[in-house]
Amino acid sequence: MLNFNIQPVKKELAAEINHKIDFKTKPAGALGDLEQIALKVSMIQETLSPELTKPHLVVFAADHGIAQSGVSKYPQEVTYQMVLNFVQGGAAINVFSRQHGISLKVVDAGVKGDFNGMPAVIDQKIAHGTENFAEQPAMTLEQAELALLKGAELVAQIAESGCNVIGFGEMGIANTSSAAVIMHKVMGIPLDGCVGRGTGLSDEQLDGKIKILQHAVEKYTVSSPMEVLRTFGGFEIAQMTGAMLKAAEMKMIILIDGFIATSALLIAQALVHEVRDYCLFCHQSDESGHRLMLDYLNAQPILKLNMRLGEGTGAALAYPIIQSAVNFLNEMASFESAGVSNSTP
Ligand SMILES: Cc1cc2ncn([C@H]3O[C@H](COP(=O)(O)O)[C@@H](O)[C@H]3O)c2cc1C
Ligand SMILES: O=C(O)c1cccnc1
């Protein structure tokens, strides 16, 4: 099993950073959540003058055997087609990444079709999709471990290029089913509170999805995070988990997107608790279980735009807000330097 050496974020600098924030030329607390974001980024980077360099977003794509049980509104082929769309620049995540100067990388973590050496698709394929966990475990333990490793190695490589802020997105038809079951197993709450409409199931279809997943879950008695991941996960979820753990080990700022990315974090946190310290929660998804996941993680999302897309879109949209938080801390005048009197702090 891979070992990740993640240091807890040190709290020692917090008083000094808060002093810097409080002495900016504004009423105390007036920059609201931006102040919390600035504090967090500063603590992760252990500096009073944080910097965001070479932001990246990595989209991991993979197919899911459970799609064959009819749990998604869309056919499995859409995963492959969307990867082509990502490399052609036409998906929502392309638009938002371009807009905010974020480098986008697209990874084949286990899509059913082949991309035949297309240079824009990073080949980290574990297999041509997972098995259907309604019948057998989605993957072997070896495959799950290899997926963690591949996700981690890619992040190490990206960090070497000078990146210190990284978000993760995913594409994989039926992956809200994997994410919901992971949530159920890790958080220990009833499955029906974890399962949502995904790509837009009707009430009747949602009932069917819950029944299929309930039946599948009853087949197994797994509890360790790696067993949960390999039994119900997907190759993109597993690679995101490894990627998050590596990013935390390298003290990068991790941008957490929606329901599926957060399910990867649930596994990552169960493996190494300190990974949570490095995360900024970018958007609360409309997928019904996401609010409960965020509560479990004691997380405040930066945005709530009623999106339910994934791909890392929430992370890309929150990025300029995080930039603004860093910029106010670095560029605003302070009462101390501006000669303006300040009675509050
Ligand atoms: C065209 C299209 C683009 C997407 N981009 C992200 N997803 C999202 O929807 C899927 C999960 O929902 P479910 O579990 O219901 O299949 C994932 O691929 C997710 O990233 C998409 C889905 C579709 C159809
Ligand atoms: O929040 C997400 O990540 C999400 C929700 C629904 C469908 N796809 C992704």
Image (cartoon, helix red, strand yellow):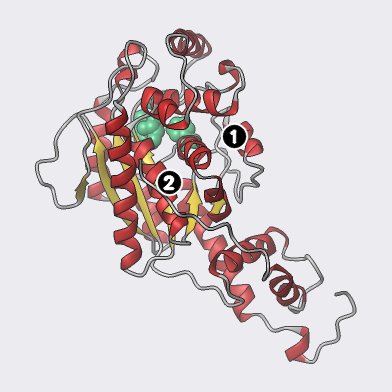
User: Which residue type does callout 2 highlight?
Assistant: Gly
27 to the left or right of 141? right
User: Which residue type does callout 1 highlight?
Assistant: Met
Q: Which residue does the numbered mark 2 point to in the structure image?
A: 312
Q: Residue at x 54, y 23 (%)?
A: 184
174, 223: nearer the viewer: 223
14, 212: nearer the viewer: 14
**Residue 243 position (above or below residue 69):** below
Q: Secondary structure at mark 1?
A: helix
Q: Residue at x 10, y 46 (%)?
A: 117
Q: Residue at x 59, y 28 (%)?
A: 187
241, 96: nearer the viewer: 241
Q: Position of residue 5 (x, y in %)?
A: 45, 54
Q: Quadrant of the N terminus?
A: top left
Q: Secondary structure at mark 2?
A: loop
Q: Decide: marks 1, 2 in contact (CB < 8 A)?
A: no
State the mark number for residue 293: 1
Disc 2 under 8 Å from ligand 2? The reply is no
Q: Position of residue 177 (x, y in %)?
A: 43, 23
